[in-house]
Image: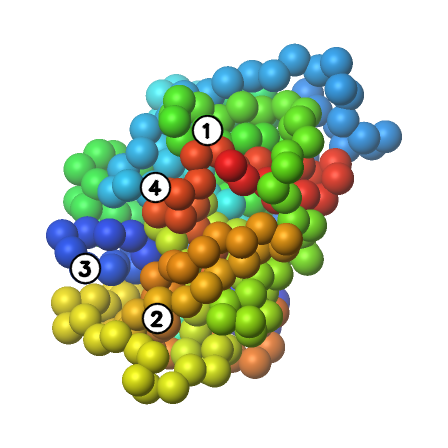
Amino acid sequence: MTIGTRQRFRLRFGMMAGQVALLVSVPGLLCVASSSPISREGGEDESAPKVEVPFKLYKDNLIIVKTTVGPIKNVNMILDTGTSPTAINKVMADRLNVRGTAGLLQTLNGTIQTQSVMLPPIQIGLLHADSITGVVQDLTFMERSLGISLGGIAGLDILRSASFVIDYRREKIIFGPVAASEKAVHFETQIPFLTVKAKIEGHEVRLLVDSGTWGLLVYRNRLRTSPEQLHADPNASISTAGGRTHVMWLSAEVSLGKGDLGARNVAIADIDSDPQYDFDGLLGFAKMGFRRVSFDFENGLFGWE
């Protein structure tokens, strides 16, 4: 069968040896985690304890946390706000004897094979996700690039179960109620993905909030630019399951909500997004100068410092 109509295509790219590389593409299925001990009913408990989970940053932007998957502890997983559903590596699925329904996933540049499966329990700090539907994906390419084994990618279907902060200075994820931030913007959408509105050179765009992306990327058909505004880099490209596509660079004034982010380098992907997709590009954090970012699901706010 071909999985298609309910999915979203998303890009992820990171700096690798001077090139912009797409590390993984996980189209999103709408699925909701059953998690404990935090309950979303009646709002978050302000007296609830905060739990810190250490992480390591790879390739300057990919957050790797230790998780428990089924009975297996200390599993490396990428924590990624831009992915849904959660994915486990094919090797991990084989080890746990997890089997599902085979299908084809359509990306902009090609087709990849995957399986839709019922995932084993996954625990990250205080988040304990049971009985969620995810996918099995071959992450061999990413493992080779990062030089570590990977159990999978923990996506938004798990992460939206509790508010949290990513502290890049301390390399900690802090799960629990989020303090008010002076710099914050409301989420435009929260399901299936988190998006916010921004302005690039005065043009309003909707960006997918993506911890797996190093900076700011916009599809070429979503931003009006003239050729003389763009700067070419022959070594810059995005690699997908189906091939490579080049990017151009735009130096532009960027604002997020009422916050002026100043002049930024914006990657313009040499691909046209489908009009049905409800976002115009990706907003990453690590190379945007953000030291902390917060996800306040109770109040629907994305904050940054």
Question: In the image shown, does 215 or 52 lie closer to the viewer?
Answer: 215
Residue hosting label 2: 250
Label 3: how many residues lie within 10 Å, few (<14), some (14-19) or many (20+)? some
Marks 3 and 1 sit apart, C-alpha to C-alpha, by: 26 Å
Q: How many marks?
A: 4
Residue hosting label 3: 19
The relative height of residue 136 versus residue 161 in the rendered view (above or below) is below
Query: Image check: 243 left or right of 217?
Result: left
Residue in the image at 48% along x and 53% along y: 261
* Pointers 3 and 4 in contact (C-beta within 8 Å): no
Give the amino acid type for the residue marked by disc 3 in the picture.
Gln
Query: Image check: 78 left or right of 121?
Result: left
Badge nearest the viewer, 2 or 4: 2
Across and down, in percent, residue 267 comes to 35, 66
User: Could you tell which of marks 3 and 4 lies nearer the N-terminus?
Assistant: 3
User: Could you tell which of marks 3 and 1 lies nearer the N-terminus?
Assistant: 3
User: Could you tell which of marks 2 and 1 lies nearer the N-terminus?
Assistant: 1
Marks 1 and 4 sit apart, C-alpha to C-alpha, by: 13 Å
Badge nearest the viewer, 2 or 3: 2
Residue 62: which numbered mark, if any? Answer: 4
Give the amino acid type for the residue marked by disc 2 in the picture.
Leu
Give the amino acid type for the residue marked by disc 4 in the picture.
Leu
Residue hosting label 1: 167
Marks 2 and 4 sit apart, C-alpha to C-alpha, by: 24 Å
